[in-house]
Amino acid sequence: WKNGSGHAPANAPAMAQAMPRPSPGQWPNDGSPSPSPSPISMRERAGAERPSLAEVQAHAAKIGLAPWKAEDWFNEMEGCGWLDFNHRPVVLWRPMLVRVKTKWEADGRPSAPPGAKTPQKPNAAHGGPSWKEVSAYAAEKDDASKSATVYAASWFRAWEARGWKSKDGRTIDWKVKLSADLAGRGVR
């Protein structure tokens, strides 16, 4: 209270009775103690829609967002009851998904969630062969001493570590390179 005493003035009951009471339907029916509608009650009455996962994925495909990122966002929104970071109900989800895409692009457009292992063929990222291919090729070139297969094992590890790139950065034709290296070791 204004007098700083912490106690209501003696005429408080008379003041409360003198305040006008709202007529039925005058206040919003959202449990709010205020006669003015809050932004949340306005949003709730605006008919916020909750899309299905299929709708989110269809819109993600339309805007160029990775399917895993769209599903990740959908699951996050389902988990928080479709509230934004300020705990307001989401009314328009499509613009939010566009914002998710913007952030995803700023992160370098990862092809999978952090920590997920992306399935790929052996050495497919480097354009190189698998060990099975190299050992089979070396076995074709091998003589009785099996020196080609023994050499091919260390050759494979060395070139795999270099990403199947030559010193000038070009991807090697591994069969030509292995044949030349074996020929240099006396294996035809």
Image (cartoon, helix red, strand yellow):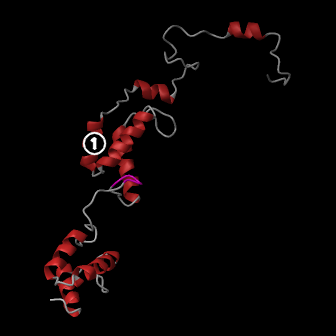
Q: Which residue is depicted at the point 53% across and 17% down? A: 31
Name the residue tied to disc 1. 57
Name the one closer to the observer, 92 or 36.
92
Question: Which of these two is toward me, 37 or 103?
Answer: 103
The amino acid marked with disc number 1 is Gln
Q: Tell me if residue 64 comes above or below residue 187 in the rendering.
A: above
Where residue 20 sits in the image (x, y, percent)?
62, 10
Residue 133 drawn at (x, y percent): 19, 71
Quarter of the figure with residue 181: bottom left
Position of the C terminus, as image quadrant, is: bottom left
Quarter holding residue 105: bottom left
Residue 11 relative to residue 51: left or right? right
Measuring 50% from the left and 18% from the top, which residue is drawn there? 30
In the rendered view, tell whether residue 151 sits above or below residue 43: below
Location of the N terminus (image quadrant): top right
Regarding residue 130, the answer to whether it shows in the image is no
Tell me the crowding category of disc 1: few under 14, some 14 to 19, or many 20 or more residues within 10 angstroms, Cα based.
many
Q: Say above or below: 169 vs 63.
A: below
Q: Is residue 16 above or below residue 77?
A: above
Looking at the image, residue 11 sits to the left or right of residue 92; the answer is right
Depth check: give the residue in front, 88 or 35: 88
The percent position of residue 49, horizontal first and vertical second, equals: 35, 30
Magenta-colored segment: predominant secondary structure: loop
Q: Which residues are magenta?
A: 112-116
Q: How many marks?
A: 1
Instruction: Look at the numbered disc 1 and give the secondary structure of its residue.
Output: helix
Look at the image and tell me whether residue 112 can be seen: yes
Front-lying residue, 66 or 21 = 66
Residue 115 part of the magenta segment: yes
Residue 100 within the segment the image draws in magenta: no
